[in-house]
Each structure stands twice: as structure tokens, then as C-alpha cells.
Image: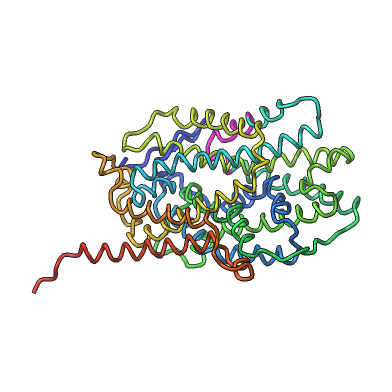
């Protein structure tokens, strides 16, 4: 895979995990912002008002700002990495975690993407069952089929879909918000107890910025490569656009869910449609666009991540591998919605933070410490010739420190409550083990240095 394969421009996408050819790298910062804002502005996003139980409006604003401050640098770096080398993060991870480790992680993060798809489809199914009762699980199957069809045609079609439906999405939520504020007495949420700042920052990041950051290269690989002539402002926009898109959506949709929960008892503003005139019902149906926006950006990376499991060599995969994977993984994800994955959302978010944060920070450190962006793309697709090649250095060290970060994150902070509630423990654990990882690289590098000549 020394040369990028051609991107399918008509019909379904067959790119898989191959590097994006230069001819297809045309995405601009504006498109990045729209894609990630709409991907983050799911019909499920307002559930953050339920997850952060008892939080007030002003504290919620501060928690979002702090979360952005904590997660911005790694998110920006991931966005830039996709422009440096036009491959997905799970292929990047082969140099850090080894082919074996990256493959196992690809299986895990495929399940994570499927879980998100199931969560959002579950919300959409509940909305449709409320508006049009009597069809049972049929709505879940219809939603799943529509979303699978959308991802089937790949990133070029997805980009157009986001651009063309953005205004419709905004209008639908504007109508629902109008009915919310005109039919119910306004209630500004006020904090009802001590704010668990650290825990809430972890939840926000695992729900938004750091849950998406490792997927940023999947989209930014379609952006032009950075050049020496590129202005610092342009480079900054490419790096910032995904993060600003994600967090602006979380802020607006989270506030809407928080207020709706206090005013109506339900965080899901689309549920208002059952008691509204025809325009309210139409807007509630239009919210399904939010489901499709987000799930497209759940299923598409999950598909490419799974293909990274199957295609670990430099051989060009069968052209039907990607479309077949879309169908199979989409059906599996829809089944997760049918069995009610939404009921496990808080535990799911906690698990995400523990899994994603150490992986993200370690990969970033290794990428820039090893300067992998200078290497030939073919090195990321070099097949393993022996078992030792599956976990070549620094894979054992990366896996060990990542597992330590996961264990620490799940163990819980050892601080007194008066101190611990201000510390985002999972983020701190990831930072700590990534620092240990970096120091280990430095020590190993010194031990491997040849002696200086006299």
C-alpha cells in the first residue's frame, strides 16, 4: 500500500482503511465544523441534563468551559494528525500499540461505535413510537435501515448530507424550543447540591470531546495536507474546527435538555411532539435528522475501525469489504437499540472515559515523540512476519501503561470528598500514565543509544 488507492466517486465507497488520495483531500474548516457540530448535536445530547443530575445552568456553563479547556489540546492534535498522514487513528496506533495491540483495540472501539449507534437509535425509536404508536420495534428497524443506507455511500455523500440538512435541523429544534418556552412556565435550573466538578468534567469529556477526538483523523484525512506555505491562522482553524463544533453543540443541546427536564420532567424535548399541533409533530420527526447526523459519524468510523481488524497487511482489500461491513455492523448496532442500551448510558459513559482517555494521550505522545508523521505511509501497513512483530517495541510499554490508566480510572480517586470532587480523576489518570509512558521512552532511548566515539 505504498500508493493511495483511488476513492470511489460514484456509488458506494470502497476506500476502507487505505490512505486518502490527494485528489479526494478537499475538505475545508467550515465543513469540518458543520460535520462535527451536527454529529455532536444528537437527539441524545440533551440527556446530559439528566446525567448531570441536580446541576444548575451557570455551573453547567462552567463545566463545559472547563471540559473544553481540558480536552482541547489533545483534540486539536488528533485533528492535525489526520492532515499530516491521511489514515485513521487505529492504523496510526499500529506504530504505538503494535499490529496485535491495535487490532485488539480496533475490535473494542468498533463495539464502542456500535454502542453509540444503538443509544441514538434507541432515542429515535422512542420518539417515533410516541408519535405513531402501535408499530412496536418496526421504527427501530426503519431507522436502522435508513442510517445504514446513508453510511453505505461513504464520506463524500455524508459531507453533502450534513451541509444540506443543517438548516432543517436548526429549524426543527427552533420550533420545538418555541413550544417549550410558550407552553410551560420558564424554570432556570439551579444547583441543588454540591457540584461534583471532577466527575462531571469526566462525564462531559467522555460524552463529547474526548469520545470523538480519536475519530477526528477519520474525517480530517480528507483535508489538504499542511504545507510550509500554509498560514498559522488556516492551520489553527483546521485544528480547532472539530473541537468547536463538538462542544458548541454539547453546550446548546445540553442547556436545552437541562431546562426541558426542569420544565417538563423530560430531558427529550422531541417528546413534546405528542401534545403539539401538526408543526410540532413535524419538527419532532425532523429531530430524527439529529439521529442520522450523529449515527453516521458513529457507524462510519466503526466500520473503518473494524476493517482495520480485517485488513492488517499491505494487500488491497476486496472492494465489497467496506459496504458489507456497513450492513453487518449497522444491523448489530440496531439490535443494541432494540434491547434497550439507553438504560445503561451512565455506566457506558464511565466505561468510555476509562478506555479512551489513556489510549488517546499515549497515542499522541508516541506520535509526536517518534515523529511518525515524517515516515513513509507504507510503514503503517507493514505486515507482521512473526509473533514478535505483532507486539514490537514500544507496544508492550504502551499497552502496559494504558492498562494501568484504565485500572486507575476505574479504581476511583483516593482523595477526601472535599478535594476529590474537584479532580477529573479519569483525565488525571490518563495524564499520569502518559507521562510515565513518555519517561519510559526516554529511558529506553538512552539505553539503546550507541556509545560515542572517542
Where is residue 355 shown, x and y percent of the image? 50, 50
Q: Nearer the viewer, residue 327 or 51?
A: 51
Residue 35 position, x and y percent, is 60, 49
* Of residues 276 and 70, the one drawn nearer to the viewer in this rendering: 70
What secondary structure do most residues of the magenta stretch adopt?
A: helix
Above-or-below relation of 248 to 387 = below
Instruction: Give how far across and how far down residue 281 sits, in percent.
Output: 83, 38
Q: From the viewer's perspective, is 66 left or right of 135?
A: left
Q: Quarter of the image holding residue 252?
A: bottom right
Q: Determine the residue positioned at 73% across, 56% down.
A: 53
The answer to whether residue 450 is left or right of residue 212 is left
Q: Please give the name of the residue rendered at 32% of the width and 51% of the height, measured from the top-left corner.
A: 396
Position of the C terminus, as image quadrant, is bottom left
Residue span colored magenta: 145-159
Q: Is residue 152 magenta?
A: yes
Residue 423, position in %: x, y? 58, 66
250 sits left or right of 441 in the view: right
Quarter assignment of residue 150: top right
Q: Is residue 331 above or below residue 23?
A: above
Q: Residue at x 57, y 56 (%)?
A: 209
Q: Residue at x 88, y 58 (%)?
A: 186
Quadrant containing the N terminus is: top left
Asked if residue 39 lies in the magenta stretch, the reply is no
Amino acid at each position: 500500500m505504498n500508493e493511495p488507492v483511488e476513492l470511489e466517486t460514484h456509488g458506494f465507497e470502497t476506500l476502507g482503511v487505505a490512505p486518502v488520495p490527494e485528489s479526494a483531500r478537499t475538505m475545508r474548516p467550515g465543513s469540518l465544523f458543520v460535520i462535527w457540530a451536527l454529529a455532536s448535536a444528537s437527539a441524545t445530547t440533551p440527556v446530559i441534563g439528566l446525567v448531570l443530575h441536580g446541576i444548575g445552568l451557570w455551573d453547567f456553563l462552567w463545566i463545559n468551559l472547563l471540559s473544553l479547556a481540558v480536552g482541547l489540546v489533545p483534540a486539536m492534535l488528533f485533528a492535525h494528525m489526520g492532515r499530516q498522514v491521511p489514515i485513521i487513528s487505529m492504523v496510526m496506533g499500529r506504530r504505538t500499540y503494535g499490529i496485535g495491540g491495535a487490532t485488539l483495540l480496533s475490535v473494542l472501539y468498533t463495539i464502542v461505535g456500535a454502542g453509540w449507534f444503538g443509544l441514538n437509535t434507541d432515542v429515535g425509536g422512542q420518539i417515533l413510537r410516541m408519535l405513531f404508536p402501535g408499530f412496536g420495534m418496526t421504527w427501530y428497524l426503519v431507522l436502522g435501515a435508513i442510517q445504514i443506507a446513508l453510511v453505505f455511500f461513504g464520506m463524500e455523500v455524508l459531507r453533502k448530507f450534513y451541509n444540506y440538512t443543517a438548516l432543517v435541523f436548526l429549524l426543527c429544534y427552533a420550533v420545538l424550543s418555541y413550544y417549550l418556552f410558550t407552553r410551560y412556565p420558564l424554570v432556570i435550573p439551579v444547583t441543588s447540591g454540591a457540584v461534583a466538578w471532577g466527575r462531571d468534567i469526566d462525564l462531559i469529556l467522555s460524552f463529547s470531546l474526548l469520545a470523538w477526538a480519536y475519530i477526528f483523523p477519520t474525517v480530517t484525512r480528507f483535508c489538504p495536507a499542511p504545507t510550509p506555505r500554509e498560514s498559522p491562522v488556516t492551520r489553527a482553524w483546521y485544528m480547532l474546527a472539530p473541537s468547536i463544533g463538538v462542544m458548541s453543540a454539547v453546550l446548546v443541546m445540553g442547556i436545552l435538555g437541562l431546562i426541558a427536564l426542569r420544565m417538563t420532567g423530560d430531558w427529550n424535548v422531541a417528546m413534546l411532539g405528542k401534545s403539539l399541533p401538526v408543526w410540532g409533530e413535524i419538527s419532532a420527526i425532523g429531530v430524527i435528522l439529529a439521529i442520522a447526523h450523529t449515527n453516521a459519524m458513529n457507524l462510519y468510523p466503526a466500520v473503518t475501525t473494524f476493517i482495520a481488524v480485517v485488513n492488517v497487511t499491505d494487500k488491497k482489500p476486496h472492494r465489497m469489504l467496506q459496504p458489507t461491513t456497513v450492513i453487518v455492523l449497522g444491523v448489530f448496532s440496531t439490535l443494541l437499540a432494540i434491547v434497550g442500551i439507553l438504560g445503561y448510558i451512565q455506566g457506558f459513559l464511565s466505561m468510555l472515559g476509562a478506555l479512551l482517555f489513556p489510549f488517546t494521550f499515549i497515542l499522541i505522545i508516541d506520535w509526536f515523540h517518534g515523529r511518525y508523521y515524517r515516515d513513509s505511509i507504507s510503514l503503517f501497513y507493514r505486515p507482521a512476519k512473526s509473533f514478535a512483530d505483532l507486539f514490537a517495541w514500544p507496544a508492550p510499554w504502551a499497552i502496559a501503561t494504558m492498562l494501568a490508566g484504565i485500572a486507575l480510572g476505574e479504581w476511583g480517586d483516593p482523595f477526601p470528598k472535599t478535594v476529590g470532587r474537584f479532580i477529573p480523576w479519569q483525565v488525571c489518570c490518563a495524564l499520569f500514565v502518559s507521562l510515565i509512558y513518555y519517561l519510559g521512552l526516554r529511558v529506553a532511548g538512552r539505553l539503546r543509544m550507541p556509545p560515542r566515539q572517542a
